């Protein structure tokens, strides 16, 4: 029978690898947005956010390395495949690559960032009783996720206005 510590370590490894896989999805989606909207404010937004999320991912990878938690290649590959299916779904929803595609993409990104914020909150709480979960600056990471989500929300709202405005509504 497994000890409570062994079970907790397995749970932590699963949880961290799930979030690492989520970062694969977000980074791929942001790369696609930057490419699809080249030379526009959306491309600049996606490129900047990609850099921020890559930095957060590096923090997570460092924490996993410090905790001797191996990265799950299967989870990362599954996330990559899931992002490709998401791209297909977005293309089917909006063939033109317009506002609906951007709206749906930014909602996925927003949810991913919220998940990351919850990761940092969970780790901060767990670090109170688990000294191995040293604090890489959880409060800063939580604030950073909130800032990222706010930036995404501005783009998401603009896309929502464009996607859901009827021609009659935009003419008035």
Image: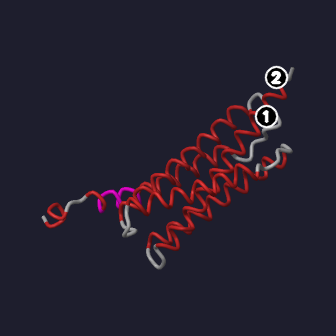
State the mark number for residue 10: 1
Q: Nearer the viewer, residue 140 or 51?
A: 51
Q: Residues within 10 Å of mark 1 (few under 14, many from 20)?
A: few
Residue 3 colored in magenta in the image: no
Residue 144 in the image: above or below residue 35: above
Q: Main secondary structure of the magenta part?
A: helix
At mark 1, the secondary structure is helix
Magenta segment range?
Answer: 155-162
Instruction: Please tell me which residue is depicted at 78% across the width and 29% down the height of the picture.
Output: 8
Residue labelled with disc 2 = 4
At mark 2, the secondary structure is helix
Which quarter of the figure has residue 125?
top right
Image spot of residue 157 (x, y percent): 36, 56
Residue 6 in the image: above or below residue 48: above
State the mark number for residue 31: none
Instruction: Please tell me which residue is depicted at 83% across the width and 49% down the height of the picture.
Output: 65
Name the quadrant of the N terminus. Answer: top right
Name the quadrant of the C terminus. Answer: bottom left
Residue 20 in the image: above or below residue 118: below
Residue 8 in the image: above or below residue 88: above
């Amino acid at each position: 029978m497994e000890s409570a510590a062994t079970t907790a370590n397995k749970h932590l490894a699963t949880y961290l690898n799930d979030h690492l896989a989520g970062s694969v999805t977000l980074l791929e989606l942001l790369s696609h947005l930057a490419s699809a909207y080249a030379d526009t404010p959306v491309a600049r937004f996606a490129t900047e956010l990609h850099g921020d999320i890559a930095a957060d991912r590096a923090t997570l990878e460092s924490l996993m390395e410090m905790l001797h938690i191996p990265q799950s290649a299967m989870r990362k590959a599954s996330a990559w495949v899931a992002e490709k299916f998401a791209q297909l779904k977005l293309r089917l929803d909006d063939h033109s690559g317009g506002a609906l595609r951007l709206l749906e993409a930014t909602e996925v990104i927003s949810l991913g960032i919220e998940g990351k914020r919850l990761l940092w909150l969970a780790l901060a709480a767990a670090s109170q009783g688990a000294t191995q979960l040293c604090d890489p600056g959880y409060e800063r990471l939580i604030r950073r996720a909130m800032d990222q989500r706010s930036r995404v929300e501005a783009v998401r709202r603009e896309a929502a206005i464009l996607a859901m405005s009827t021609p009659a509504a935009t003419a008035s």
